[in-house]
Image (spheres, helix red, strand yellow):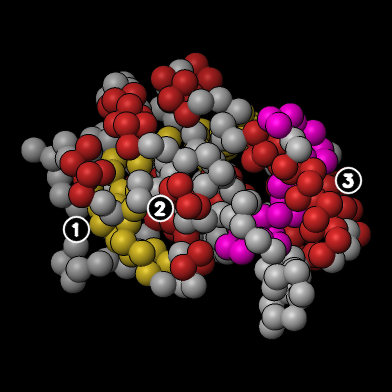
Amino acid sequence: MTPKSARASHHASPLRYPGGKAKLAPYFKALVRKNRLLDGTYVEPFAGGGGVGLCLLLHGYVEHIILNDLSAPIYAFWRALLDEPDRFQQKILDIELTTEEWLNQRQVFQEAEGRISFEIGFATFFLNRTNHSGVLNAGMIGGHSQRSAYGLDARFNRQELAARVMRIAKNRSKITVMNLDAAELIRNVTEIAGDDRPLIYIDPPYYRKGRDLYYDFYRQEDHGKLRDVIVQLNSAIPWVVSYDNEPAIRELYDAHQMLEYNLSYSVRNGRQGKEVMFMSDCLKPASLAEGGLQAPLPQAEFNLAS
């Protein structure tokens, strides 16, 4: 398979996600090339919108992706899209964008109680596209009066979203979606992936703002437990972890390669946020320039563990 240009659009996911990492796709493309991981398997234990993985797959960098999310609503979304893409696409094109419909979809979402169905999956998608910043528990864009300059349709481009669904559906034989605890997937990743050297991208809930942004968030001790699982992986397995750039997180991963960079968050009105990425020792890191990332400091580079 011949990969497409690293500059190809990274808007592959139908979901908007708080802190979504689709903007890291060019960096991962450079990483895949540099480490000769083309046509391999890519795994996201905290997939959310799956932006990076979808870009790598649709642009020809990997052959198979595993998107996992413990959140039942997010898993229901992926199941609905992949199992019934034609129905999903048609519903995008037909659904009314009204306050009444938003209330209907919110009720479906709130009464889900962990169940998985097409209706719950679509309700998750609908709220993601019509809520402030894509946060599932937030209010609707434009408020109940819908007198704001931005209304429910502000992030609901029917034609584009329907097209994204069908692009993904055409590749569904190369996509596996799962509903496992992230640690369980990581521990058993080679068996689950059927690959001795899958590329794992681990993007846990933010350390500082996670409680405010995510339907399922991590407590402080959860971040430490996750680190313990990651560092026990076979040394030949390539992995990348990304976080908000907090001292407590840097301390957790201080024995590993580290890259600090800036990333725009739509949830913060486009402002730049400081993030940090850690890598397994078996990976050759790409540079900031290769991945199109901005450094928070003029000379920010990788700190290689001794």
Q: Residue furthest front?
A: 145
**Which residue occupies 80% across, 50% down?**
105
Three-letter amino acid code at the position of disc 1: Glu
Residue 301, which numbered label? 1
Q: Is residue 178 left or right of residue 151?
A: left
| Label 1 with label 3: CB-CB less than 8 Å | no
Amino acid marked by disc 2:
Lys
Q: Residue at x 89, y 53 (%)?
A: 90
**Disc with the residue nearer the chain's start (1 vs 3):** 3
Residue 125 to residue 140: above or below:
above
164 magenta-colored: no
Marks 3/2 in contact by CB < 8 Å: the verdict is no
Q: Secondary structure at mark 3?
A: helix
In 3D space, how far apart are the residues under numbered discs 2 and 1 (Cα atoms)?
Answer: 26 Å
The stretch of residues the image draws in magenta is 113-134
Q: Which residue is mark 3?
A: 87
Rounded to the nearest angstrom, the CA distance separating label 3 from label 2 is 35 Å
- Which tag, 2 or 1, sits closer to the chain's start? 2
Residue 162: quadrant of the picture: bottom right
Q: Can residue 256 be seen?
A: no
